[in-house]
Every structure is written in structure tokens, then in C-alpha cells.
Amino acid sequence: MTTVFVSHPPAKLANYFGDRATAALRAIAQVRFNPSDADLSSRELADLAQDCDAIISYRQTAGDEALFAALPKLKAFVRCAIDIRNIDVASASRHGVLVTQASAGFIASVSEWIVGAMIDLGRGISASAASYHAGRLPPPAMGRELRGSTLGVIGYGQISRYLCDVALALGMRIVVHDPYTATDRAEFEQVSFEALLAQSDFVVCLAPATEATENMMNARAFAAMQPHAFFINASRGNLVDERALLAALDAGTIAGCALDVGRAPDQMPSPDVAAHPRVIATPHIGGLTPPAVEHQAMETVSQLAEIFQGRAPKGAVNAAEAYRWRKAFGAGA
């Protein structure tokens, strides 16, 4: 029987893989688990995964040259998420190891987090609750409705498409900036980056993290926003110059922000930014709901079942170079 190593630390297994996926995995393979509560280094993972046919990768598990070189029997490195930036795909290909990624199961979950963040920012819910918890009586403050407000969405991917439909139902005006993808929607106005910043009451960052988007939200970008506008980042911390964000918050250049990601380890919001009184921060929980997690975990198990039967699963990123998998399981025979 094939053997699979699951790299999630035990404390992360329930939230990021789950019992149902674990049971389904045990039905198709012998399973080994990470015994350590810490994230594994390449050397530690190589020692624990000797003789394993596949590794299911947690987001902090590095699939690098050292790992693939140290595991000559490894056939597949399966990422239990859509983000594969922890994997050196070129090195995996050189060693004949198949790399796969799961599809996005968190589209609704992240979109709902964004809507909740907009409501919280516009109505001061967290700030009022914090005052009450501290024994202070918060003054009633005028809030802002989402209906009639302008939502500016940076990046038009799967989450953005879903979010825009929800925002339309809430009566929001929508502007979108994406230099690579046309919305093809009459309900939305596709605008330049500068126009989006100038028009929006809520600026939501959903662009992917690339060299082109590194620090795209910088001092110049925040200065282009309206003083009453809010910034929301549900993408990656790499897109934001955090010094510039703090300066904009301190100066009142923008009214506030909500962050689910940042430049702290594991894409968590940076503590000094999260502590700012005009910031609502959550610990990377946008996609952390049972349906979202189970979608990706169960898809990962299905991918392994396909691999063990000699078929390239949907989500394979280097099937043509994965000679170990083809040789072991008869793929393409």
C-alpha cells in the first residue's frame, strides 16, 4: 500500500485538514503524521518522510531542492491549498516529483469576511465593543451604510467575482481595477488604479502577490484615497507597505483599515499594525470555515487517489516532468 506523510503540525490538523479528510486518506493509503507542534524544516521532514510516496503539504512546509534530493522515493508533493509559493516547482520537476494544488474553496468564506469587515469599519462595531469591555461608555457615532457606498476592488479573480455580486445585492456601486482581466460586466466600471483609489469608500485588495504587486499600496496610493475611505486587505501582506499604512492612519489620510493578512510569519498581520486603534485585524481566518477547509482537504485526497491510479489529477502543475510518478503508477502507459 502507498504511504502518505501529512506535514501539518498536530495543533493545525483539525482546522486545516480535518477528520473527514483524514478518514478518507486512511482508506487509500498508510498515513504518517507530523509528530511535532513546530513547522518542519526540510531536513526534519526528509527524516520523517523517508520511503513515503507522497507528502501532503501544510502552508509552512517548504518543498525545496534539499527536500526533493533527500527523498528519492517521493512521487508527489501535494499542496492542500491553492497557494504553492512554498514549493520550488522547478526543483520538484528536476527530481521527477509531481506537484499539485487544490482549487479555491474559500471564495464565499473570504467574501463574507470582507463584508463583515466593511460593516464593522463603517459602523464602529469593534471600537464600541472594546470600549464597553474596558468599562467605558462609547459615544454614539454616525455610521455609514454599504448601500450607496462605492466599493473599489483591486484584482478581479474568483473571490472578487463573488464579492462583487454580494455587493451589488447590498446596493453598492462597484469599480474594479485589474490590468489583466476584463470584468465583462455592465454593472461594474473597470477603471485605472488611481481612479479606483480616488472614487472608493472601501478599497479592497484582492490582487495576487507577485513582483508587480509588491508594495502596490504605498504612500502614494494611500495619499490618493479619500480621507473618509477604508482600506481592507484580504489577499497577502506583500501588497502593502506597512510603514506607509501606519503613517496614513496616524495622519488621518485614510479613516481606518481591516487586515486578515500581513508581513508577520505565516502571513499574519504584523503586531504593530494590528495594534493601531484604527485597525481591525484577524489572524488569517478569512478562509477558515469548515466548508472552505473541507473543500481543499477532500480535493487533496481525491488528487492522491487519482495519482495512485496513474492519472494526472486536476490541479497538477508539472505532470509532464513528473517521471517518478509515471514510472511508479504506470501513468500514460
Image (cartoon, helix red, strand yellow):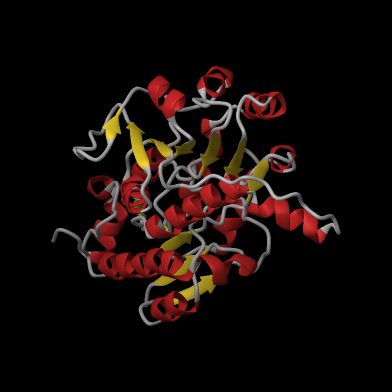
Number of marks in the image? 0
x, y percent for residue 306: 26, 67
Left or right: residue 184 versus residue 84 is left
Q: Give the residue displayed 31% in from the left and 51% down from the top.
A: 165
Q: Quadrant of the N terminus?
A: bottom left
Q: Give the residue displayed 50% in from the left and 73% down from the top.
A: 18
Name the one closer to the observer, 23 or 320: 23
Q: Quadrant of the C terminus?
A: bottom left
**Among the 4 quarters of the image, the one containing residue 154:** top left
Left or right: residue 147 versus residue 119 is left
Left or right: residue 117 versus residue 97 is right
Q: Which residue ends up furthest to the left in the rendered image?
A: 333
Name the one closer to the observer, 43 or 100: 100
x, y percent for residue 106: 41, 58
Q: Give the residue displayed 62% in from the left and 51% down from the top.
A: 41
Query: Does residue 308 sit above or below 271 in this rendering?
Result: below
Q: Which residue ends up furthest to the right in the rendered image?
A: 135
x, y percent for residue 200: 44, 32
